[in-house]
Image (cartoon, helix red, strand yellow):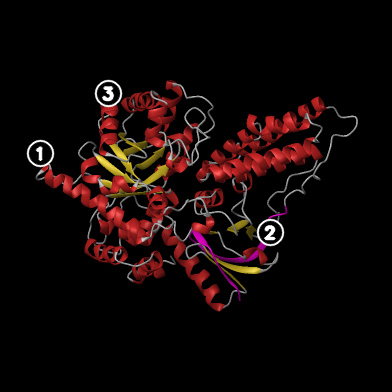
Amino acid sequence: MQNFVGVGVFRGRVIGPVRHMPPALTEPPAGEKLEGSTTPEAAAASLKTAGATVKEQLLERAGRAEGAGKDVLEATALMATDPMLIKAAIKLVKTGTSAERAIWEAGDSVAQMLTNLGGYMAERSHDVLDVRSRIVAVLRGVPAPEIPDSAEPFILLAEDLAPADTATLDPAKVIALVTAGGGPQSHTAIIARSLGLPAVVAAAGVLGVADGDVVFVDGSAGIVSTEPADAEHAAVAVWQEKASLLSVFDGVGQLADGTLIPLLANVGGAKDAQEAAAANAQGVGLLRTEFCFLGNSTEPSHEDQVAAYKGVFEAFPGKKVVVRTLDAGADKPLPFLTDTTEPNPALGVRGYRTDITTPGVLARQLAAIADAAGSSQAEVWVMAPMISTPAEAADFAALCTAAGLRVPGVMVEVPSAALTARHILNHVEFASLGTNDLTQYAMAADRQLGPLAALNDPWQPAVLALIQATVEGAVEQARHSASLETSAPKPVGVCGESAADPALAVVLAGLGVSSLSMTPRALPAVAAVLRTVSLAEAKVLAYRAVGASSAAEARELVRAGLPALAELGL
């Protein structure tokens, strides 16, 4: 037996045969020139036509996809006709380079530029290379590599998976995803969570497993094992038996002693919100408004924004919906806000900071949110991403007041915000911890990079200490506010992926977090585990985790104190 350890990105245990993703198209020969009868103008026209064809193909697939898969395909389709890519290729054909070689070299250049930018931009480099291969396939008149077909369910194995592949795979055939590359926030991870597929990424060496070999995949532990024995078959049986217990959330998040911990959903638009409501989410803890507009080259109109927000609000009448204002920049570029020439975009003008370089967009967004809220029955809260100082919190609160929005808040994803939470909460009504970014900034580890996955782990004691500091800051703010002497601290929730980890959810509750927001698929498992511990027990486990010397030790200490995890196959 061989064991490969990677990063588990969605729970589940399965055993099945491996099918490798087919190899990519062969590279056109270096120095390949236009054929004698082909003019540069004709080659340029063929490039434009091929790009448009690929765009149509991807949009057609997007029409059959749902949720995150649809969003990913639509964003990738735009890349097929991206002026930066096509113009770079046309420039090469004008020097006599063949169309295939020109788009290949142009793709390399654009992908390398995006890789150098880091963060989400680096992740988009995979999209460029995928689109490049598809354009070459159209130019050659051959099909692009696709997910293999099989008469039996299989485990898909690849170096990494392009968004166009993962977005429309059939969960009835593909029972798990395993990649040697990628990271916990890669497209593979995002799609796996949205489809509920067991998945492991960044599993070094796993490509050595032969096609057809039977393997065991544990999406929680991040383990892939060849030649599964009785223990692995038993683990799968336990999972299958217990998984039915984790299929439904009754709509009440609480601990064993009755302490309420509302369980909310992270959504990207109206369709996501409807699915979250159907899953009995108690509200929306994070509406990622930039997801509604990733395909826009210009600022959306007031009417378009109102319609997008209203669609989410209508799914949760009478319930809380927390709207995050545009988190553009670095990992989520928007053409009308993002400067792609920044040398270090993760530390650049993103989130709330875009109001410095492009003033007016934020105020107009708040006005649209207010209009949508005014015609709905949802309880609308609004928060700004990338707040670093109390002064920024005060400025954002003033903008919300001017727009008529009564519940302003902030994202805590920068360590400075966690450490000054007491002062920040003097100006706003709530805080929400974005643990994905908080982790990467605390650990100086790009959250997209597989080699840094061990550092980029929300179980890191330093990250847990920052969460603790934020909650304690809320307590201190209440204690030092003359008008709030007898009031509870302002709410501090979590909307990062850490909330979807049932064991870590217990730690967050023990640290004093007031609500948890996650992908809807995680609600039943998180709710089931929370109901097995009292607040006092959760506090003890949280104390152990914060005091651990490493992320691995913190996780091990907490899991040892939660027998329900094994009982539920988690």
Q: How many marks?
A: 3
Say if mark 3 contacts mark 2, CB within 8 Å. no
Residue 117 in sight here: yes
| The quarter of the displayed image where residue 297 is located | top right
Answer left or right for 472 relative to 461: left
The CA distance from mark 2 to mark 1 is 63 Å
Q: Secondary structure at mark 3?
A: helix
Tell me which residue sits at (36%, 28%) in the image: 369
**The magenta stretch spans which residues?**
1-23
Q: Secondary structure at mark 2?
A: strand
Mark closer to the chain start, 2 or 1: 2
Report crowding for label 3: few under 14, some 14 to 19, many 20 or more residues within 10 A (C-alpha): few
Answer left or right for 192 relative to 567: right
Instruction: Tell me the amino acid under the disc marked 1.
Output: Ser
Instruction: Tell me the amino acid under the disc marked 2.
Output: His
Q: Label 1 belongs to which residue? A: 483
| The quarter of the displayed image where residue 532 is located | bottom left
Residue 132 or residue 69, whichever sits in front: 132
Q: Secondary structure at mark 1?
A: helix
Q: Label 3 belongs to which residue? A: 402
Q: Label 2 belongs to which residue? A: 20
The CA distance from mark 3 to mark 2 is 56 Å
Closer to the eye: label 2 or 1: 1
Tell me which residue sits at (60%, 48%) in the image: 166
Residue 392, x across and y down, in percent: 29, 35
Mark closer to the chain start, 3 or 1: 3
Residue 386, x across and y down, in percent: 36, 40
Residue 376 or residue 148, whichever sits in front: 148
Say if mark 3 contacts mark 1, CB within 8 Å. no
Report crowding for label 1: few under 14, some 14 to 19, many 20 or more residues within 10 A (C-alpha): few
